[in-house]
Amino acid sequence: MINFRFDGKVYTAQAGDTLAAALLRNGIGLVGRSFKYHRPRGIMTAGIEEPNALVTVGEGGRAEPNTRATDVFVYEGLVAKSQNRWPNLSFDVGAALGLAAPALSAGFYYKTFFGSAKKWMFYEYFIRKAAGLGNAPTLTDPDRFSQRAAFCDVLVVGAGPAGMQAALDAAEGGKRVILVEQDHILAPSLLRDSQEQDAAWANATAARIRAAGGIILTRTTASGYWEHDLVTLTQRISEPGQVPTHDVAQRLWHVRAGQVILATGSIERPMAFAHNDRPGVMLSQAVRTYVRRFGVVPGKRVVIATNNDDAYKSAEALKDAGAQIAAILDARPAPAGANSGHRVYNNAVPLSTQGARHCLKSVQALVDGKTMDWDADLLAVSGGFTPVVHLHMQAGGTLDWNEDAQAFIPVSSRQNVTTIGGAAEPQAIFKMVPVSSPKKSFIDFQNDVTLADVDLAWAEGYRSVEHLKRYTTLGMATDQGKLSNMAALGRLAQKQGVAIPEAGLTTFRPPYTPVTMGLIAGAGAKDAGAHIRRLALYELHAAKNPIWQPLGYWFRPRAYPISGESLAQAALREAKAVRNNVGMTDVSTLAKFEVSGPDAAAFLDIICATTISKLAVGRGRYTFMLREDGIVFDDGTVWRLDENRYLLTSSTGGADRMATHISYVRQFLCPHLRVSAVNVQEHYAGIAIAGPQAKAVLTALIGAEPPRHMSTVPAAIAGVPVIILAASYSGERAFEIYVDASQAEAVWVACESEVFAQGGTLYGLEAMEFLRIEKGHLVVGGEVDGRMTPHDLALDKMLNKAGGYIGASGLSRPALSETGRRQLVGLEAIAGDIPEGAMLIPSEGASPQGHVSAAAFRIVTGGSVALGQLTEGFSRHGEILIASSPTRGQQARVRVVAPHFYDAAGERYRD
Amino acid sequence: MMRIPCPHCGPRTQSEFIYERTLDSVVPLNAPTEEAMAKLFTRNNPRGVDDEIWRHTYGCRAWMVLTRHRVTNEISGCRAIGPEALS
Amino acid sequence: MTELTISTLPAAPLHVFEIWSNPATVAKRFEATCGFALPHMGRSDGSDALRLIRFEPTVWLVEGDASALSAILSDDGAVTAIGGGIVRIRLSGKGWRTLLMEGGVFDAESPTFAAGCSAATIIDHVNVRLHVVDETTCVAFVPLSFSQGLLHFWEQAAGSLVE
């Protein structure tokens, strides 16, 4: 015995019960309220197609709304709540108020939207309160979700007798096999209907499949079929709301299969007649499943309505279980069902039902043109069978119309997929046309769409099945039209006066059954969604408790505040230390490439737009790179370390892009060159030391005269080999020290101790930004924004006169030399602080002529300065403009100046 | 998610690869400006088979030309690109 | 829980050995000097003193003493140090294949991915290079910046590997 709670009350279930079976076992017929009209609804099916019995299972962060009671297996302590009712399931205000059918007919939302806004707002209040399904949990889901890849020769979807046999044959034929079943047992249909095989056969077959190396996954749904035979499986490791044994609640499998066999079976169809949505109306096979598999008899006096032979098996099951079969209404003419031993009415179709809120009381049918009534507490219906072709169709398959079964069956696909079993050969049925009043004849139970809604859509001119779907919302609920689509198509075809296949089909989209968002996020659901890239010296920085700054996937220290400093205060102190004394910072994230070989210089002359080949050994140079269309896309420095060995640095943010670009050019455009370009971004950690005392620090560290500006030497610090580059981003005399990242810690510690001994400090990205803006150095992603030419950035004098670099021909496009282009300028504030991102306007209300790309302060003397782009900016120095940021509500009056606010002559970084 | 037959690694999942451009938009190093710009800015974009450049960036890092049907994703060929292919 | 130990190996010199011309001649010189042939694509060869693992058509990853390799290459290729940027993570125990399927896209469970095999792939968004040492040991070469994140991912995933 298992205890569970439903709407606060404790009940008991049997082992193996679905929640639906357990509710029926406890005599609970009313399980939910319908989406639009709040009509009382019961359990209609025994499978994943259940449209009515949607409940919220679990509590807190584990609560899973809209769980089908037929698709959750009861465990000790399960807590379920009914949905879409207020104040309670039995008495619902929405239903009582009659937020009624006429108000919410097909296209209600569209019509109301097009009506007056007042009218919409009036309705909205009620709709928001009343409509909708379960509520999303507000707490974080404590469980983890796994994503796992799998590869196999044969993937079999559906462990019915056909699927199991196919899996067995493949596994014993030496294939890698995966067999998936959405139920928690294999071949569940064998418990419903005794066939040639039985449950013992299923167990033995499963054992043989496993012995042959096959993998069997139960509680696993093949929910999507993608390109090249990739199938995604959603596996429930724990039941909804249940605490998982090993933290992981569900697993998303990405299965890449050589071949896919679909043994997905079929779904029984309901029939369309008035009040066919009442609790007590159930699909025939579902009735049989409850009786035979779960030992629950959902009615004592039963009417069965059918258009096929299968429903007679339900009559047998019910009779064996002691229920009384009041009548079998067979739509087929005599002698169908003649020898069944039951009271069979031929040419009989249901018209309506009567009952109370919780139960069915009687059934009315049209028999040979005459109306008849039966008292009954259960109506089992079978309107035929719809093959489950979803995966086949997602795989790009085509369908054929099978007239005998009145069903679409799978034909071919461009992928390696075949359908076997019931999904390929549905049972023959008798074609029925609904005769009942269409008004309460529901076809989409979950979205409350009736035949009348289809008729209305037709009357209003909706002809295409896709339009019909969107106008009526038919098939758009969580069940995705599994029960409703064929009924709607039949009605549409009838209206159009064509055969069903000509009415068209809506698209089958993944997922087959709803998938929780956590599963799609996977491990990322618990983190930021992606890994953080850590600096090699992360621990050293973290010990100083800096303010961290995300930069792409990297996290870098933005500032190192001391004694309660704000970010701005800390950054200004750090920047001042660099201007007045010395500072050090971690520049490890810069892109770095080691380029070697006899043709290394020739290769760099292609990549870089400046001349590299004339660089002497031990010297370095600023450089920039162009896209093929002539636009600047990155910049950095290049250093000749040795005769045939160069180090190229470029921006952090562009590192991956540059790696791809270098590889493309090398492999695609000049495969003949004898050159190797290796990405050493992470191999070398980088430390920058900058300031008037930087040279003294370096001299102490390496025990020798450090290199001149734009020169490089190999050296050792703390016994560790390093490369020292004399380069300056800050505008001060500065050095970059590159060291094998695995040995960087000792070097950092030695540098830090020397810098501190000089009274210097660490500085972060914010101070670095202040320094470079004041100096007028560019940043990729700021001033270099993918629109600027070398000329626009005043870099054109550095271009390689000989050409031959990537972008040289693009640069010759006439439009790039026309007047009116945006050009790099400096801006200094006359009044106010310049807001970053502000537009530059000549006067209030005028059109923008440019923008502020980066704003900072004069570090030592104070005053707001900025870099920006301005139309024809080179010739506008001295002009007064307004830097206006309406989004920040800030503006400043600025003067256009040259983009160098500090040491324009570049004297400070020379000895 | 496609499966791409890498000439060096065999069939691998698309997420290991990065798409570069179509083969006909490769601009040779010494192409005259007009030809270069035509290749860059005038694209065929056929509804059907095209030759595309992909890189097995998160695998063997090699470049390749993939012949792919853009509607059905059917891949009818894949050849290696780069310096002398080593066996 | 499936038997599995995840450990970070100490930092060691790693190099890339790239050939751009005359591959056949270089291969001969290599074998004559080192005593084993340059491994084919997706394979490794050598010993702890010097091991070459091939992940790329023209590039080999070198573990161990690379000092003799520049002379072998001469002007037909280059050796470049990359060890600082790579963390070697050893996965030992039978469960390593299953672990690599978590967040993966590569068939590490294939019986053909056996001792001496190598493959580069992407696992939980991180570019990882794998080398099968033996049936119960696989070494992953992980970019330094992602190594802590991937270690965390693997440690979590290993806790729920239930067969």
Image (spheres, helix red, strand yellow):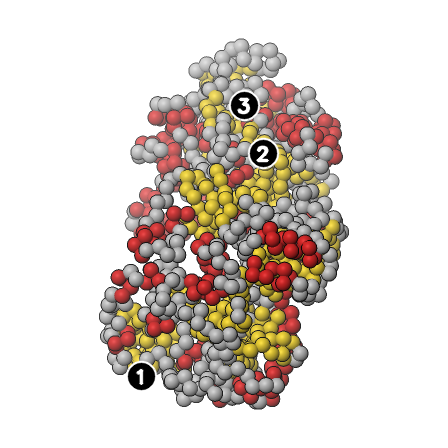
Q: Is residue C115 above or below residue A308?
A: below
Q: How many marks?
A: 3
Label 3 residue SS: loop
Residue A65 locus on image (x, y percent): 55, 47
Please say whether residue C3 is visible from this viewpoint: yes
Which residue lies at the image location 51% right of the left edge and 24% below the top edge? A383
| Spot occupied by residue C134 in the image (x, y as percentages of width and height) | 74, 50
Question: From the viewer's perspective, is A609 left or right of A145?
Answer: left
Residue at (56, 86) in percent of width and height: A705
Looking at the rendered image, the quarter that the N terminus of chain A falls into is top right
| Cα distance between the residues tagged 1 and 3 | 82 Å
Neighbours of disc 3 within 10 Å: few (<14), some (14-19), many (20+): many
Query: Mark 2 and mark 3: span between their CA atoms?
Result: 23 Å
Mark identifier at residue A259: 2
Residue type, label 1 = Ile
Q: Which residue is mark 1?
A: A830
Residue identifier under label 3: A426
Q: Earlier in the sequence, mark 1 or mark 2?
A: 2
The residue lying at 59 percent from left, 19 percent from top is A312
Q: Nearer the viewer, mark 1 or mark 3?
A: 1
Q: Of label 2 and label 3, which has the lower sequence position?
A: 2
N-terminal of the pair, mark 1 or mark 3, is 3
